[in-house]
Image (spheres, rainbow, N blue to C red):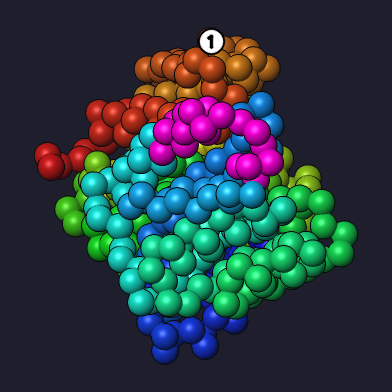
Amino acid sequence: MFFADREDAGRRLAAVLGHLEQERPVVLGLPRGGVPVAFEVARALGAPLDVIVVRKLGVPYHRELGFGAIGEGGVRVISEEIVRRSGVAAGDLAAVEHAEEAELVRRAGRFRAGRERVRLDGRTVLVVDDGIATGATAAAACRVVRAMGAARVVLAAPVAPPDAVARLRTEADEVVCLSTPSGFSAVGQWYQDFSQTPDEEVVLLLAQAAGAGQRVEAEEEVRVDAGGVGLAGDLALPPGAGAVVVFAHGSGSSRHSPRNRSVAAALRRAGLGTLLFDLLTPAEEARRANVFDIETLARRLTDATHWLRRREPLPVGYFGASTGAAAALCAAAAAGTEVGAVVSRGGRPDLAGALLTGVRAPTLLIVGGRDTTVLDLNRQAQARLRCENRLDVIPGATHLFEEPGALEEVSGLARDWFTRYLAVPDR
């Protein structure tokens, strides 16, 4: 069984967990990748969502050997046998625990953004991850949750190897797994999109589930008319939105891209509306050549812009990634599009070719400092632009901006560019 992305996996997992709804469970996602899956499960069950932050304790000089785990609230689960067999001094073990506790507190505080953790005493607790490899972290989570007072522990994941599931049945009261392939080597092999989940997305999903910030109900599923072709999209308009940013994703991605969704959330918090939609139908995406057909992608983006303006007569900006950046620039150069601003994230503006000289919208190019090939291509493309433009390089970042803080920096740069050049009301 293969999954498109974590959102798809969460919805499919939720479909087999309906029997738990009557138990009014608390859903806990293992950060970071387990939280998008858990979010869909919690939404389907109408259950509260939180994270379960667990830190494994590794024996010094032999860290892969765990002597226990710690959780929030001072919960400690220690294997006295491993401690005894390790022969390590008590002071050294205490130093490991102290360091891991500091990291646990930091991560929990970052993810919850000041909210209290959900109490587990006497509750059925559903622990969710995006997949299980060895099962060590999942087992530690189950032990910590039980020590926190859970009356019943259910572990759920989309995919795991059969032997790990068998072992975990001794840790949880119930284990639910959609797929247990015998040829398992890594969780990511069972996902089409298994890109890293940024901290920002975890924070956003927990805030949405808790009722803070922009709730997911504000996002409307739409059918974008692109020259007679119906394309799936998600439109979100915060109250008083003065402009809309249309996202053009790159090759191999979709409107569900966690990176684009993270940026979109930051833009909405700044008062901007967002439209994320698929530039190609599923059948068209199956032909690899289509994702590099910049002319077709640009035409679809232009058609989508006209569709959006008929529905919401607001200023429009484009946010493009990878090949989507080229499509955004080509569409911005088209007569009658009237785009207010363009931002490219790790894009290929060079693929816009001769149309670069026709772009009039202020354009921001954002590239990772370690994405050297794409950086050179952006510099070449920037030299051809005749509009107001800027190239911002994020030091240490690679093509997908997966490094800590890199995507947040992208979001901040994009937010500032759009709020400067699009008509956004004071907030």
State the quadrant of the C terminus: top left
The quadrant in which the N terminus is found is bottom right
Q: Which one is nearer the viewer's eye here, 134 or 36?
A: 134
The reply to whether residue 265 is in sight is no
Which residue occupies the foreground of this view, 136 or 195? 136
Q: Callout 1: few (<14), some (14-19), or many (20+) C-alpha neighbours within 10 Å?
A: few
State how many labels appear.
1
Q: Splitting the image into 4 quarters, where does residue 397 fall?
A: top right
Residue in front for this viewpoint, 238 or 67:
67
- Magenta range: 82-101
Q: Of helix, strand and loop, which mostly describes the magenta segment?
A: helix
Q: Is residue 275 left or right of residue 269?
A: right
Reply yes or no: does residue 28 show up in magenta: no
According to the image, label 1 marks what residue? 383
User: Outermost residue, left direction?
Assistant: 426
Please state if 52 lies on the left or on the right of 74 as rendered: right
- What amino acid does circle 1 point to? Ala
- Residue occupying the point 39% across, 63% down: 148
* Helix, strand or loop for disc 1: loop
Picture layout, residue 321 above or below residue 41: above
**Residue 375: which quarter of the image?**
top right
